Image: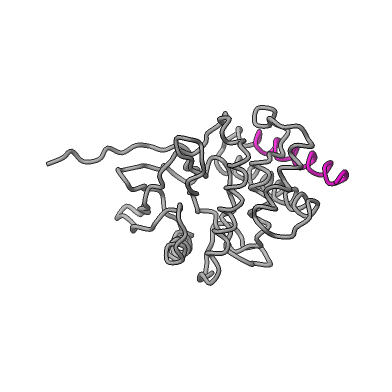
Amino acid sequence: MGQPDQDEVLAGGNSGEVVRRGDTVLRTAGEWTPAVHRLLRHLESAGMPGVPRVLGVEDDRRERLSFVPGECAQYPLPDHVWGEDVLLDVARLTRRLHDASIGCDRTGPWRSVPVEPSEVICHVDIAPYNVTFDEGGRVVGLIDFDHATPAPRIWDVAHAVYRFAPLTTDPSTDPFTEDERLARVDAFVDAYGWPWTRAEVLAVIVQRLVGLEDHATAESVKQARSDLLEHAALYRRDAAFVRSLIGVV
């Protein structure tokens, strides 16, 4: 008889420890889990590749999901994250996700507050740390749907552009000039295939960043974590930076 699979604690897991056991992942469930599981089952029935499959809920109230192959990018981010092919593949993956979510039961509660107009169900946190990459640095899939919620398509696109253009004041995750970053905004939108203007996307990025700052500030008090105040300060600086870009597009 073979040895049982050993538990491997995975990086991330802000809502609780995430453990890999062979080809499955165990993570803390919450009141939002039934809604997320309905979404994941709907995506499976729609033939959406590269996302976790629901395998059940354990007796200890941990959800059990399939392991999505590949490695997520952790900070400091590796160079392959900034490849043009990655930018376009993430845009196309986002579009496939949104299209596949149409028709899914939107009954809550959702962990993140729904946003109107709720055109699709958004992932809400499309970023390098939630995208899986193969050994060659190509995009494989998307994980961590805990914050998924009904929202307009641009809600996801704005956050993904912020993370992958990227539009940040943090020099450690920003290898491009300002003009190159703005060109990457356009390339992402073109690959997604929706007629937003650059200014429209930037405006929603500011909206997302203000919300992220507020959330990080509140969680710093709730969790007694002073490091989250540093995150809040970065979001505040980045919002000011993106506002300055709106004035030149």
Residue 52 position within the rendered picture, expressed as x and y whole percent measured from the top left = 42, 53
> Which residue is situated farthest in the right direction here?
247
| Residue 57 x %, y % | 34, 57
Number of marks drawn:
0
Residue situated in front as seen by the camera: 175 or 122: 175
Image: 50 above or below 182: below
- Which colour scheme appears in the figure? one colour
- In the image, what residue occupies the spot 76% across and 42% down? 182
The percent position of residue 215, horizontal first and vertical second, equals 64, 47
Which part of the image, by quadrant, shows the N terminus?
top left
Asked whether residue 2 is drawn in magenta, I would say: no
Residue with the most extreme left position: 1
- Which of the 4 image quadrants contains residue 179? top right
Residue 3, by quadrant, is top left
Magenta span of residues: 229-249
Whether residue 240 is in magenta: the answer is yes
**Prevalent SS, magenta region:** helix
- At a point 43% along the width and 41% down the height, the residue shown is 70
Left or right: 206 in relation to 40? right
Residue 41 or residue 107, whichever sits in front = 41
Estimate the x, y position of residue 109 in percent, counting from the top left.
52, 64
Horizontal side, residue 235 vs residue 245: left or right = left
In this rendering, the answer to whether 15 lies above or below 116 is above
As drawn, is 60 to the left or to the right of 18? left
**Residue shown at 41% from the left, 38% from the top:** 10
Q: Is residue 199 left or right of residue 83?
A: right
Nearest the eye: 46 or 158? 46
